[in-house]
């Protein structure tokens, strides 16, 4: 009986207390409250917005995408005129953002690795130089650096007329305050063969690489894949170029009126943005690379020397693969930061997504809610894409690990 | 949960008085309750609205706001200024953050009808022009084909520019910035050949360049830019107040009443003057103010001519002639309906 | 045996004196050889670096010091040919760079707030000073209230509207408010993200990933252009306050991830021990988990703060005048415009930011080393 009573009281206790103290019940109530609170906030925000928009007589919806934009853009990768729609302007901005993001990531990674290795160099000067670089660039706001590059770069460059006086009529290379002018390659009849040759060389490189790896596993013999591939990549297109009768012409820029016309132009805004983004992000990447390499224990190096590997092979086969495991996750977040930071373009007049869409389009349509939501969603999607890609890459690199 | 905390924090801050400003349909009541007029101005355009080092604002647009404050409170200093970018200005007005937007804003049909705004008048007739370096040897805007043009985004200027070059079958490279200071800096650094904005703005900006005398404003005016104060749609009383403050300043100039002689003019027997200064009729009460509203405006701010001369006229570094902004009786466009 | 001893003519009983290392590896020459010219590649690199330094350093020194204009009244003094940096500009505008347009007779309030902040920060930064809990309470609760009263002007002080604030004052206000608000929010979000309640967890993940996925500038645009439309009719916030809300939400997502890192580093035994002591979740979190986790993430918090401090410069894009904003605005002052003014202004702003960020990053590195010995 006593035993039974004890059980009973226990059951009673748990039954009485469960409403207050049962984690499940409490959790349920808590979550329900959270949902109600969030829903209430969203609801009040949305109804307020609808009220405000209706009272102010502001148009809403996404119909504006089809309307004529009516403004011009300085740098367009796809055909665009002021008669194009807002939707096309949106894509022009998006592409400009992506171009600067992709090239920026590429350049920043290279500089970052070089500087990171330089910080570990035994050479006193090189090491100190890299340290100063990292400390200065890391501790000054990016926006300030962008403004500085833009204004500093612009202020020391000559005007197109002055530049043209030095360069002559046909301008092969000119850097002035309207941009960097390079000759443009204009394909003529038969030029497509050169493109095919490049593709063929790349394919050959890939298959030779696979074959060489297989052979090395089977026989232990090595094959100079890199040199062969590089050779193919140079020889094949050159052959195609000669065989088809040199179908490429160079178009030079020349001074006409105010500006240089023709050729291949890189705008100063783009240069300043790329320079600023790449140098700034590189200072963070350098620290990541340094930390990654330091994280590989000294024993690994010694073990690989004991196996008779030379220093070059040691770093390529032993240290770098292990360091990469440490480097890649923070590297991903730096790539994300670079992509997001490219939105600072708006301060120096580079026509990126925020500048074109969140700036000009927003001003002309007055539809702040739609435009800003879309802008934010696009960046969110870009971030998720970048991190998905890097996660995939990370999982491939991690396979090296045991 | 976090949202709740957030809203609590926000609410607490708002209650503590860090700028929770009510804005309902009866703007006049709100303004009277809080004791000042919140006026949206530019972030700094000499002659129209610009702060000095001590943070005191001056300019034509600023004086209009001071006029409204004088009419409502009898105190031209009962104004607070919100510097706004071109992008923020309409949202700020729509959301009730400011009571009147007086920020060299062009009156266009779409703004007047689609954004929930009302333009209360035109306090400066402007037109878009071009500024170039004299060294380029350009004398007409029609010679500008192929030029790089600096322009501020979010303005009617950007669209007029496109239309003008298109209509004249010319090409150009746009260089677009969000903020006026950035456009100025880029033009000064020779990033572009041409700077385009309202002509009054060009004169003001030229002053701030490192070598003002090397630049010239081209004669062409490519658009109509009537600049004026803006209020929210749907509050007729407030709309009337802003509109008639401007009209009172114009009428005062026409009748020869200035801040200096307004006290003597109180003794005038001219019925027009008596009506304006509140000696006859109850015009002030009709817009919810005291009958001395116009007297206060003229006494504390001055008539339109005084405001113009003080801020942008010949005696200032800007040195803009009255031109189309002269009174209608002197060959200009400024014309106010009578007070009757 | 005997033969052996006799056959050896000389047995050395003392160690011979050590010879000096070869001259190639000692002294200045040796240091240079070892550190600059160890291998042919090093030699090439060293020579390139030296050439780069010769190319860069003298012009910079000349610009910043030798031909710089130190005193002057206006642009005429800085526009002389061959002049370097225009420090006179910084000197003339220094008050604005620090306080913005804060009324001159009220600036003592800003100074006092600064002193109050330092009085709280110094003892909490030095590990050996006790009363950390009280100190943190002062910094997170008492100081913000005092600063609010002093800066905005409550209780009889002359009110100063935020439109007049500017310069370093705004930079610090945005950064500190961001960090103070994001700290509790970040803790809650981090706990929520590790929670077993699915909806809470999902909400926290979405919240964190959303703010981390968008650029701060769009957040600021949102708070300056979009937020007003979402508020009920008749409610509107000060422009600075709106920016602060955006910055606080943004940084709380980053703070949450930093704190989550700390929570993950706490061994599972600690959680189990707290449960075994019959502590409730909040008691366990407050008394056992958080003190350990927060100590671990001090460097992370400082690094987040550095990032936030630098990011405050973005508020200039929405028309607030932080340090960079006010420097940039003053560059267009007709009285001071000269070819050297923009560069001088930028260098000055960069220097101020550098001092703050470098100082904090040194401190963070110091704490990291300190915590490293205690842990692991």
Image: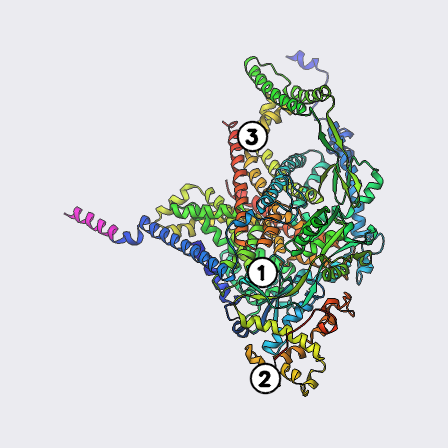
- Mark 1 belongs to which subunit? B
Q: Quadrant of residue C154?
A: bottom right
| Label annotation for residue B199 | none
| Disc 1: which residue | B90
State left or right for residue A338 relative to residue B304: left
How far across and down, in percent of the image, does residue B146 sit? 75, 45
State left or right for residue A71 relative to residue C229: right
Can residue C320 be seen at all in this image of the molecule? yes
State left or right for residue A42 relative to residue A342: left
**Magenta stretch: includes residue B256:** no
Q: Residue at x 62, y 86 (%)?
A: B279
Establish whether labels 2 and 3 are both on one chain. Answer: no
State left or right for residue B3 relative to residue B181: left
| Disc 2: which residue | B281
Q: B148 or B58: which is nearer to us?
A: B148
- Mark 3 belongs to which subunit? A
Q: Secondary structure at mark 2?
A: loop
Q: Foreground mark, 1 or 2?
A: 2
How far across and down, in percent of the image, does residue B210 sit? 79, 56
How far across and down, in percent of the image, does residue C335 sit? 77, 62
Spatial CA span between label 2 and label 3: 91 Å
Q: Foreground mark, 2 or 3?
A: 2
Establish whether labels 1 and 3 are both on one chain. Answer: no
Q: Foreground mark, 1 or 3?
A: 1
Q: A272 or C148: which is nearer to us?
A: A272
Q: Secondary structure at mark 1?
A: helix
Q: Quadrant of residue B225?
A: bottom right
Specify start and end residues of the magenta stretch as a single range. Answer: A1-15
Spatial CA span between label 1 and label 3: 56 Å
| Label annotation for residue A322 | 3
What secondary structure prevails in the magenta region?
A: helix
**Magenta stretch: includes residue A5:** yes
């Amino acid at each position: 009986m006593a035993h039974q009573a004890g059980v009973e009281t226990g059951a009673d206790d748990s039954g009485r207390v469960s409403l207050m103290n049962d984690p499940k019940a409490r959790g349920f109530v808590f979550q329900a409250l959270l949902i109600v609170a969030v829903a209430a906030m969203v609801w009040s925000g949305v109804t307020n917005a609808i009220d405000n928009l209706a009272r102010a007589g502001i148009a809403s919806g996404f119909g504006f995408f089809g309307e004529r934009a009516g403004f011009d853009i300085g740098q367009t990768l796809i055909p665009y005129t002021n008669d194009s729609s807002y939707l096309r302007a949106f894509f022009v901005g998006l592409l400009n953002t992506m171009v600067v993001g992709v090239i920026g990531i590429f350049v920043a990674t290279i500089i970052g690795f070089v500087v990171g290795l330089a910080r570990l160099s035994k050479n006193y000067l090189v090491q100190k130089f890299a340290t100063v670089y990292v400390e200065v660039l890391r501790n000054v706001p990016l926006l300030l650096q962008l403004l500085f590059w833009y204004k500093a770069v612009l202020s020391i460059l000559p005007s197109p007329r002055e530049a043209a006086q030095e360069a002559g009529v046909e301008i092969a290379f000119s850097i002035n305050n309207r941009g960097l002018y390079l000759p443009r390659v204009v394909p003529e009849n038969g030029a497509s063969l050169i493109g095919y040759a490049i593709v063929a060389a790349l394919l050959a490189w890939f298959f030779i690489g696979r074959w060489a790896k297989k052979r090395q596993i089977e026989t232990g013999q090595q094959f100079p894949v890199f040199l062969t591939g590089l050779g193919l990549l140079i020889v094949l297109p050159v052959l195609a170029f000669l065989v088809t009768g040199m179908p490429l012409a160079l178009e030079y820029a020349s001074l006409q009126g105010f500006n240089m016309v023709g050729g291949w132009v890189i705008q100063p805004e783009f240069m300043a943005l790329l320079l600023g983004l790449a140098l700034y992000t590189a200072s963070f990447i350098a620290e990541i690379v340094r930390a990654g390499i330091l994280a590989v224990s000294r024993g690994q190096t010694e073990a690989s020397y004991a196996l008779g590997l030379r220093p070059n092979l040691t770093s390529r086969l032993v240290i770098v693969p292990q360091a990469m495991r440490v480097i890649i996750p923070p590297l991903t977040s730096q790539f994300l930061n670079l992509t997001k930071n490219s939105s600072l373009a708006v301060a120096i007049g580079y026509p990126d997504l925020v500048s074109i869409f969140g700036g000009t389009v927003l001003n002309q349509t007055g539809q702040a809610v739609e435009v800003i939501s879309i802008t934010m969603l696009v960046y969110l999607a870009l971030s998720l894409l970048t991190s998905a890609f890097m996660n995939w890459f990370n999982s491939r690199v991690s396979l090296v690990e045991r | 949960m976090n949202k709740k905390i957030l809203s609590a924090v926000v609410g607490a801050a708002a209650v503590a008085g860090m700028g929770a400003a009510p804005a309902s349909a009866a703007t006049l009541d709100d303004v009277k309750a809080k004791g000042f007029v919140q006026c949206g101005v530019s972030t700094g355009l000499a002659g129209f609205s610009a702060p000095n080092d001590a943070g005191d604002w001056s300019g034509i647009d600023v004086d209009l706001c001071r006029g409204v404050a004088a009419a409502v409170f009898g105190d031209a200093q009962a104004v607070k200024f919100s510097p706004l970018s071109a992008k923020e200005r309409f949202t700020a007005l729509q959301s009730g953050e400011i009571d009147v937007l007086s920020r060299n804003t062009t009156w266009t049909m779409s703004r007047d009808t689609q954004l929930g705004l009302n333009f209360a008048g035109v306090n400066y007739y402007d037109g878009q022009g071009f500024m170039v370096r004299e060294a380029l040897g350009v004398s007409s805007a029609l010679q500008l084909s192929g030029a790089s043009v600096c322009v501020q985004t979010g303005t009617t200027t950007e669209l007029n520019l496109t239309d003008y070059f298109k209509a004249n079958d010319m090409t150009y490279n746009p260089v677009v910035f969000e903020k006026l200071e950035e456009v100025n800096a880029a033009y000064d650094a020779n990033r572009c050949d041409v700077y385009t904005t309202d002509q009054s703005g060009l004169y003001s900006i030229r002053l701030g360049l490192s070598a003002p005398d090397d630049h010239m404003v081209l004669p062409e005016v490519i658009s109509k830019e009537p600049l004026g104060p803006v209020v929210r749609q749907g509050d007729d009383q407030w709309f009337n107040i802003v509109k008639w403050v401007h009209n009172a300043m114009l009428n005062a100039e026409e009748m020869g009443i200035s801040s200096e002689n307004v006290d003597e003019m109180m003794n005038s027997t001219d019925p027009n003057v008596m009506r304006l200064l509140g000696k006859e009729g109850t015009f002030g009460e009709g817009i919810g103010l005291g009958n001395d509203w116009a007297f206060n405006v003229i006494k504390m701010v001055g008539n339109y001519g005084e405001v113009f001369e003080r801020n942008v006229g010949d005696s200032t570094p800007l040195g803009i002639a009255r031109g189309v902004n002269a009174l209608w009786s002197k060959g200009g466009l400024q014309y106010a309906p009578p007070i009757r | 045996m005997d033969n052996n001893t006799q056959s050896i003519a000389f047995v050395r009983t003392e160690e011979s004196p050590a010879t000096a290392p070869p001259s190639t590896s000692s002294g200045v020459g040796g240091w240079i050889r070892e550190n600059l010219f160890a291998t042919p590649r090093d030699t090439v690199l060293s020579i390139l670096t030296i050439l780069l330094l010769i190319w860069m350093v003298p012009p910079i020194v000349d610009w910043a010091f030798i031909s710089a204009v130190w005193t002057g009244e206006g642009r005429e003094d800085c526009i002389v040919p061959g002049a370097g940096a225009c420090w006179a500009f910084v000197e003339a505008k220094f008050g604005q760079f620090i306080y913005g347009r804060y009324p001159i007779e009220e600036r003592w309030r800003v100074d006092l707030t600064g002193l109050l902040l330092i009085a709280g920060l110094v003892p909490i930064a030095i590990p050996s000073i006790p009363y950390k809990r009280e100190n943190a309470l002062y910094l997170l609760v008492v100081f913000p209230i005092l600063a609010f009263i002093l800066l905005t002007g409550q209780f009889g002080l002359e009110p100063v509207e935020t439109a007049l604030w500017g310069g370093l004052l705004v930079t610090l206000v945005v950064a500190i408010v961001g960090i103070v608000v994001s700290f509790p929010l970040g803790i809650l979000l981090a706990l929520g993200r590790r929670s077993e309640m699915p909806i809470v967890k999902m909400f926290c993940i979405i919240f964190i990933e959303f703010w981390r996925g968008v650029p701060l500038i769009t957040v600021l645009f949102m708070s300056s252009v979009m937020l007003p439309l979402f508020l009920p009719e008749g409610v509107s916030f000060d422009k600075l306050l709106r920016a602060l809300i955006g910055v606080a939400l943004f940084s709380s997502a980053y703070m949450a991830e930093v704190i989550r890192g700390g929570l993950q580093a706490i061994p599972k035994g600690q959680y189990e021990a707290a449960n075994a002591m019959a502590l409730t979740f909040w008691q366990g979190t407050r008394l056992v988990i958080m003190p350990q986790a927060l100590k671990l993430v001090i460097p992370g918090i400082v690094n987040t703060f550095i990032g936030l401090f630098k990011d405050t410069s973005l508020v200039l894009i929405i028309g607030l005048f932080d340090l960079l904003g006010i420097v940039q605005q003053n560059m267009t002052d007709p009285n001071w415009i000269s070819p050297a003014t923009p560069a001088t202004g930028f260098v000055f702003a960069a220097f101020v930011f550098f001092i703050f960020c470098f100082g904090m990053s040194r401190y963070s590195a110091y704490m990291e080393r300190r915590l490293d010995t205690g842990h692991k």
